């Protein structure tokens, strides 16, 4: 006869299930928000958070899941299966999630970008620079941007610039238009008319 004090808890009612769901949500949010993180946080902090959330956490959860499966052969298999399926699904979803984060960050700054572009079109950014390459760098509402003195039809809005990466949004009043015979090597993800996202990895 079973002991009345004994109770069985399926895996989906355990703390492991809550931890898995919480981590899945955080992982998706972190990938979508990585561009805002690179814009606002030091690169070392972003790298540390990414390593902890996207490397250490799934390893620990996988160990916890297999340990649970050994203790609960009835429903315990669900935890590692769900984790591995999620990790497998993140492989094709990685790129679209990053692109979604690019577009969200772009839209959050778009009013300022449009104001800067309007000033450029009106000739209010035609300031010369003594910097090498003729670049002029300014700041507006906490957003950095640069353009070539006397030729502000191309403007780079800088999200991140450090020893590892440079990324941001590039506006070109005369954007390259690809054809079947010509590719636009300098343009990244198109965002809006004249705007595109760019990423430069530093060696």
Image (cartoon, rainbow, N blue to C red):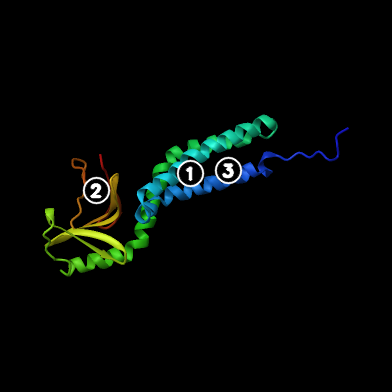
Kindly identify the residue that appears in the image at 35 percent across and 48 percent down.
43
Q: Within 10 Å of the Cα at label 2, are there few (<14), some (14-19), or many (20+) other Cα atoms?
A: many
Q: Residue at x 56, y 38 (%)?
A: 61
- The nearer-to-camera label among 2 and 3 is 3
Circle 2 sits on which residue? 187
x, y percentage for residue 48?
42, 45
Q: CA distance from mark 1 to mark 3?
A: 12 Å
Q: Nearer the viewer, mark 2 or mark 1?
A: 1
Q: Is residue 85 left or right of residue 70?
A: left
33 to the left or right of 19: left
| Left or right of 148 on screen, residue 22 | right
Residue 193 numbered mark, or none:
none
Marks 2,1: beta carbons within 8 A: no
For the residues carrying marks 1 and 3, which lies nearer the camera in this image?
1
Question: Label 3, on which residue?
Answer: 20
Q: Quadrant of the C terminus?
A: top left
Quadrant for the N terminus in the image: top right
Q: Mark 3 falls on what kind of element?
A: helix
Residue 33, position as x, y percentages in the image? 42, 52
Chain-order first, disc 1 or disc 3: 3
Mark 2 and mark 3 residues within 8 Å of each other at the beta carbon: no
Assess disc 1: are there few (<14), some (14-19) or many (≥20) residues with their C-alpha within 10 Å of its C-alpha: some
Q: Earlier in the sequence, mark 2 or mark 3?
A: 3
Measured from the top left, where is residue 51 in percent x and y? Answer: 44, 41
* Nearest the eye: 124 or 52: 52
Q: CA distance from mark 2 to mark 1?
A: 31 Å
Farthest right residue?
1
Reply above or below: 1 against 152. above
Q: Which mark is first along the chain, 1 or 2? A: 1
For label 1, the SS is helix
Q: CA distance from mark 2 to mark 3?
A: 38 Å
**Numbered badge on residue 53:** 1
């Amino acid at each position: 006869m079973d002991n009345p004090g004994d109770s069985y808890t399926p895996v989906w009612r355990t703390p492991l299930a809550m931890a898995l769901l919480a981590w899945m949500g955080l992982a998706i949010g972190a990938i979508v928000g990585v561009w805002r993180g690179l814009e606002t946080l030091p690169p070392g902090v972003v790298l540390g958070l990414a390593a902890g959330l996207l490397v250490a956490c799934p390893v620990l959860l996988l160990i916890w899941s297999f340990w649970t499966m050994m203790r609960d052969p009835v429903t315990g298999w669900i935890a590692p299966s769900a984790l591995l399926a999620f990790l497998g699904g993140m492989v094709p979803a990685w790129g679209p999630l990053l692109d979604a984060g690019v577009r969200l960050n772009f839209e959050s700054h778009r009013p300022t970008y449009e104001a800067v572009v309007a000033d450029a079109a009106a000739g209010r950014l035609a300031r010369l620079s003594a910097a090498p390459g003729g670049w002029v760098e300014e700041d507006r509402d906490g957003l950095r941007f640069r353009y070539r003195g006397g030729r502000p039809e191309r403007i780079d809005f800088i999200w991140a610039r450090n020893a590892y990466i440079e990324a941001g949004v590039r506006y070109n009043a005369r954007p390259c238009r690809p054809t079947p015979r010509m590719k636009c090597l300098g343009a990244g993800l198109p965002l809006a008319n004249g705007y595109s996202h760019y990423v430069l990895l530093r060696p």
